[in-house]
Amino acid sequence: MILDVGCGPVEKKENDTIYLDLIQFPNVDVVRDLDKGLPFDDEKFEEIKAFHVLEHVKDFIFVMSEFWRCLKKGGKLKIVVPSGQNAWIDSTHIRQFNEHSLDFFLIKDFNSVNAGVNGWFKLSEALYIGANEKEKKGRALKFLLEKM
């Protein structure tokens, strides 16, 4: 099972995917405010996609803990967030991200100065996407995390 969080209007539904959004767009399965938690059992999903949604949530740590709770061990969390100036184009964005914004949630050496939660996720990928010559860092950041 896959959970697509903040999916927006869905044109073509996939059978193995549950579509969740704050607004009842076409083909949304679950209408839910992420700041109230996810209405799913523990370890239900093999994958959670959160594309252009985390910059809107009020309690980022709580939402990340909900993603962790609902993912199966070894499950993938795919995140895309706006980067740089793009983070502030939309007035509903309440946080900005860089390539280290998820370090708090990653497996770390216990000698690390960043205390964090140590061990929720392993980082598989963090890269800027949509880069051009003028904007070397890209228009968005893509993260791929694995639940440990």
Image (tube, grey):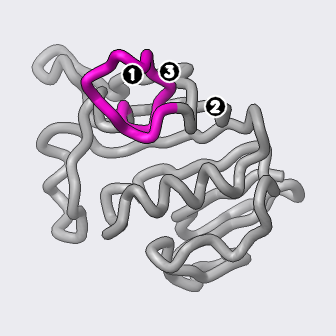
Q: Secondary structure at mark 3?
A: strand
Residue marked by disc 1: 127
Q: Secondary structure at mark 2?
A: strand
Q: Which residues are magenta?
A: 103-118
Task: Residue 146: give its label.
Answer: 2
The amino acid type, in three-letter code, at marker 2 is: Glu
Which residue is at the front of the view, 56 or 147? 147
Q: Where is residue 35 drawn, in percent x and y?
A: 44, 74
Residue at horizontal 73 percent and vertical 38 percent from the top: 75
Task: Residue 30: give its label.
Answer: none
- Earlier residue among tags 1 and 2: 1
Farthest residue, direction front: 111
72 with respect to 39 (left or right): right
- Using the image, determine if residue 88 lies above or below residue 113: below
Q: Residue 84's quadrant in the figure?
A: top left
In magenta segment, residue 147: no
- Earlier residue among tags 2 and 3: 3
Query: Does the magenta stretch mainly form a helix, a strand or a loop?
Result: loop
5 with respect to 116 (left or right): right
Q: Are marks 1 and 3 in contact (CB under 8 Å)?
A: yes
- Using the image, determine if residue 10 lies above or below residue 67: below
